[in-house]
Image (cartoon, rainbow, N blue to C red):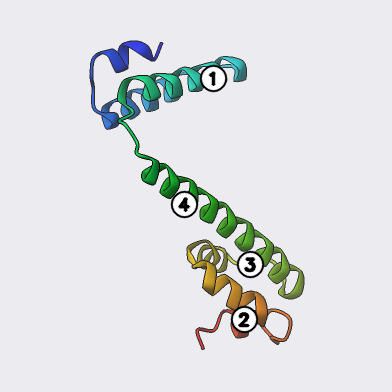
Amino acid sequence: MARPLYERHWDKQRIIDRFSVIDWLMRLPTELEQRLLQEVCTLERNLSMPYVTSAERFGIERGLQQGGQKQGEAALLQRQLARRFGPLSDAGAARLASASIDQLATWARKVLDAESLDNVLDPQ
């Protein structure tokens, strides 16, 4: 199903737009959806993946590790804040999601002694 889209050498956004229309028109059973995603990944890897140097691979792997670490730290801090001060607002959760690893670490140190959520997330 996906192969003809890639064989036409369409740009990525055009392919995404086509998949959006297909998703809107019909919902695939989970098994078929997983097979489609696997096919798309294989096609992208085989048809459009440029050569990646070892330095680029290292950078990609490091970025993925740091992203995973940041998500884990943000999730842990969100649980701690919710337990101490009650559920976070959407704005508070968004603030955690956009924070740097250093900012998350600072807030994590403050959570034990702060009297309120505002004291934890205060920029000072």
**Mark 2 neighbour density, 10 Å: few (under 14) some (14–19) many (20 or more):** some
> As rendered, which of 122 and 22 lies closer to the eye?
122
Report which residue position mark 3 lands on.
88
Q: Of the residues shown, which amino acid type is indicated by label 2?
A: Val
**Residue 46 x/y as whole percent:** 37, 20
- Mark before the other along the chain sequence, 1 or 3: 1
The kind of secondary structure element at disc 3 is loop
Whole-angstrom CA distance, mark 1 to mark 3, is: 34 Å
Q: Of the residues shown, which amino acid type is indicated by label 3?
A: Leu
28 lies above or below 78: above
Report which residue position mark 4 lands on.
63
**Residue 70 x/y as whole percent:** 56, 59
Whole-angstrom CA distance, mark 2 to mark 3, is: 12 Å
- Mark before the other along the chain sequence, 4 or 2: 4
**Mark 4 neighbour density, 10 Å: few (under 14) some (14–19) many (20 or more):** few
Q: Of the residues shown, which amino acid type is indicated by label 1?
A: Glu
